[in-house]
Amino acid sequence: MTPSNRAARVAAVTRVLLALAICALLVLLAHDVLLPRLPAPAAPVPAASAPSAPVPAASPPGGATAPSSTASASGAPVDPADVAAAVAPALAQAPGTASAEVRDAATGEVLYARSADQTVAPASALKILTAVTAVDVLGADRTLTTSVVALPGDGATELVLVGGGDALLGAGASDPGRVDGRAGLRTLAQRTVAGLRERGVTGPVAVSTDLRLFTDDSPLNPAWSAGLVESGNITAVQPLATYGGRTAPGTGEDRIADPAAFAALAFQRELTAAVADSGADLPVRARDVVPATSAPRGDVLATEPVARVESAPVGQQVAYLLAHSENQVAEVLARVAAAADGRPATHDAVPGLLRDRAAAHGVDTAGMRLVDASGLSPQNRVTAHQLAGLVEAVQADPALAPVRDGLPRPGEDSTLAERFPGSPAREAVAAKTGTLDQTVSLTGTVTTGSGRVLAFSIVCSGVDWRIAPARAAIDEAVSALAAL
């Protein structure tokens, strides 16, 4: 073989190995915030059925015991020296800089701290605070209404599709067995036809939208990079959307640029079909683009709807967003909560609401800087001490049970599905994952072998895409805690 041929072969092999390494990294990232687009493992469904997003159970399957405010006081107290011996060696191997705090969930005693007061980008651990805020402000049993209001129009009855903050609408019939798709646009269209006939309305109808529940100038947060939008991690934050800003169910589906426009056209199609099926004298003036209504917002809100559908309760949506690290649902629920709290439903108003709710639960928010509700922006700054304190508060407050029970667990349909295989932590951990290109985090609870519940937060910063070794170090530390 000539030197030139040998050099060409070496170069080709190098290119292949580099490509394989990049593919392996992308597969690792696909399980979390940075690229949360692969569907989590789900139980097989019949071929004719869409992938199911079942209502989260109140307690984890498989015999695991969900930590609770009463269970956290059981078991023998843990010696801080044992915690340090368990955690420190693992974190010493982590890439970048590790910050961590472990505390007794029952007493609040800090058992271990490593750079715990250093502000870091929490990544999706921030969704725990968003979930707490949604439950606090809206209530776990609250449902979000998508409605249709009939107003007199120019030669046709105007049917205003009013977005009420349900980002998990279904395109078909309402499905009571799902979180995404609990409220369906087909059901809403059928109810609209029935409601109009009941009122004696006849003649042409035309669909418009009212998205004024949210008041941002732009539906995209300027703190998000274009790459986050292009990769499908987030899209326009609007109070009307199907499947978390997607055209079909499943967190592996692509998001669309204008979820509200898609939902409005889907409703218009279903309305046309419902009119045809019913034989009603309600010809639909279909348009390629469904416009925003020009009716005053006050008039829309003051008019009794002709039809409505209700979302899954907020508590179930919170469990869904935590399990799947659902950025879109987190952002939408945060704005709905801001509006309910009497604040503007805007990117700028949400961080203040989140900080206020953290403070209300006893978390010292000094130094906390937030710019979104999903943790997508690396500009967010929180400490491990604050995150562990928030977890402790979740454990202590029975009203926050949907957040506690909604935290991902190994082996379930969640971002922790494939973590901790064969480890004692597999039956002991309930925690929110987080991943950005420079950050890997895990925040939640771990139950020791004696039954003591520990609240923890571990954040590896400056990892420079070294996602796998950072996760391995965190998992080793948490597994060691579970073995205590």
Image (spheres, rainbow, N blue to C red):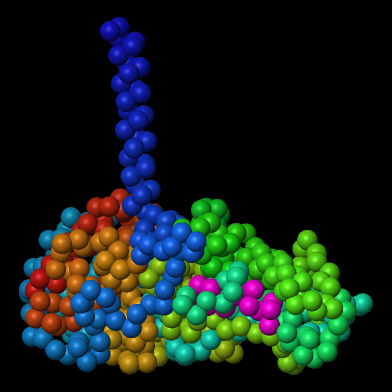
Looking at the picture, tell me which residue is in the foreground, 66 or 205: 205
Front-most of residues 46 and 425? 46
Where's residue 275, x and y in %?
76, 74
Which residue occupies the foreground of this view, 249 or 418? 249
Residue drawn at x 72%, y 67% is 269
For residue 206, side relative to residue 329 (left or right): right
**In the image, 420: left or right of 196?**
left
Magenta stretch in the rendered image: 179-191
Residue 399 image point, x, y percent: 37, 92
Q: Residue drawn at (25%, 87%), measured in percent from left and top?
A: 68
Q: Tell me which corner region of the image, top left, top right, bottom left or bottom right, holds residue 211.
A: bottom right
For image coordinates 30% across by 21% down, the residue present is 10
Farthest right residue? 155
Is residue 3 something one can see in this rendering?
yes
Query: Where on the picture, by quarter, is residue 81?
Result: bottom left
Camera-nearest residue between 472 and 384? 472
